[in-house]
Amino acid sequence: MVDMDLKGKRVLIREDLSVPLKDGEITDDQRIRAAIPTIQAALDAGALVSVAAHLGRPKPGQFDPAFSLAPVAKRLQALIGKPVNLIQDWQTHTGAVPGQVDLWENIRYCEGEKTNDPDLAKRMAKQCDVFIMDAFATAHRAHASTCGLIEQAPVAVAGPLMKAEIDSIQAVLDNPASPVLAIVAGKKVSTKLTLLEALLYKVDQLIVGGGIANTFLAAAGHEMGASLYEEALVPKAKMLLAIAKERGVDMPLPTDVVVATSSDFYGESAEKSIAAVLPTDCILDIGVKTTAQFASMIEKAKTILWNGPVGLFEIPAYASGTKAVATAVAKSAALSIAGGGDTLAAIAQFNVAKDISIISTGGGALLSLIEGVKLPAIKSLEQKNGIKTH
Ligand code: ADP
Ligand code: MG
């Protein structure tokens, strides 16, 4: 797994175990499953294994049960068949025992994790002899438990899952067959929107959905009602539409949508043209015409890069757009890469995993790779070890 003897060593593995939850239950455990071979290999090598991970976006400095890794510990234990101990306070913990896994409680409860505080990273580094950075889906963020820990740990190496994900994605990106189609949707408007500019120089077609599409629709002058969008990014969206036009990138915006007619998303819904959206409406899915248009683009593409559900697919009334996109990607003969926490959940929900060429645990990290950015965690590993990691 890694090129060194781990026997008896305190090995700390950073994984991305941020899985979607509903009412405290895990709705998709692909990220946990993906992490298992690395953890198992460390156990097999006789290491004393601890795992650091985050879940969602809790407020730093306080415990919030909604973001506890307890359900993850339980699932990991069931899948790996070894005791998994959830460690509330890793700072005072004496360390793992052979044959068991210590899973540290949500690392984002720690003040300084997201700001990459070197003191926090130093305290984490004291708990290990070897740090294995294996969280591809978090490799695009310079946090204390990623870049900080790489710097501070006695030894830091890239883990096999992270390496394999980068290898397989990079192989496609180095030589993509045209037309190349990217689908970028979901709700992380501000972080994803900024990546789109780079994408416009790399793809032939771009489909936007979810809150990102709404920001573009607002830029095109449409009423957004109570829909999720980012007003401050409307000028940026206008600029991107102009770049797409200039470069001949086909970038259709939704022409019809499904809306919730009140703030109760489980209440009434209506399908309408984008021009008919009312101030009280909340756009939560694409309409049938748009769905057909997107499906036909997907069918003709040779390379497909997909991150983000195009609607609130967790609620059945707003799932059909995402279901159609997932099905079309799976049916298409294109080489397809899909990734992102909620995108994985959609892929599982619509049962299309086996027909997608590469399923990545990463959303933002996948988009960063597509953009051509060197992932911060890779940069830190290269700086520390003086060798090209990727
Ligand atoms: P990923 O985890 O795959 O990177 P995101 O976290 O960015 O994707 O977004 C996924 C979430 O976006 C899903 O929970 C989905 O319900 C939500 N979503 C998609 N479209 C909309 C929309 N129009 N309005 C509100 N939420 C949306
Ligand atoms: Mg998500």
Image: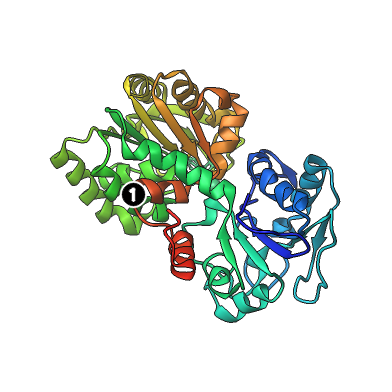
* Vertical position of residue 129 compared to residue 28: above or below: below
Residue drawn at the location 31% of the way across and 35% of the way down = 175
Q: Is residue 43 above or below residue 105?
A: above
- Residue 146 appears at what percent x and percent y? 55, 64
Q: Is residue 302 above or below residue 315?
A: above
Residue 359 visible, this angle:
yes
Q: Residue visible at 75% across and 75% down? A: 91
Residue name at image x 48 percent, y 61 percent: 377
Query: Would residue 272 be found to the left or right of residue 242 on screen?
Result: right
Residue 351 x, y percent position in the rendering: 60, 24
Residue 280 in view in this figure = no
- The extreme bottom residue here reads 119
The furthest residue to the left: 246
Residue at 78% over, 54% down:
70
Question: Which secondary structure lies at badge 1?
Answer: helix
Neighbor class of circle 1 (other Cα within 10 Å; few <14, some 14-19, many 20+) is some
Q: Would you say the beta carbon of the disc 1 residue lies within 8 angstroms of ligand 1?
A: no
Quarter-wise, where is residue 88 in the image? bottom right
List x then y, in percent, for residue 317. 56, 28
Q: In the image shown, does 36 or 143 lie closer to the viewer?
A: 36
Residue 252 in the image, given as x and y percentages of width and height: 28, 32
Q: Give the residue pinned by disc 1.
A: 371
Q: Nearer the viewer, residue 368 or 328?
A: 368
User: In the rendered structure, which amino acid carries the disc numbered 1?
Assistant: Glu
Q: Is residue 339 left or right of residue 221?
A: right
Question: What's the image's color scheme?
Answer: rainbow
Q: Quadrant of residue 249?
A: top left
Q: Number of callouts in the render?
A: 1
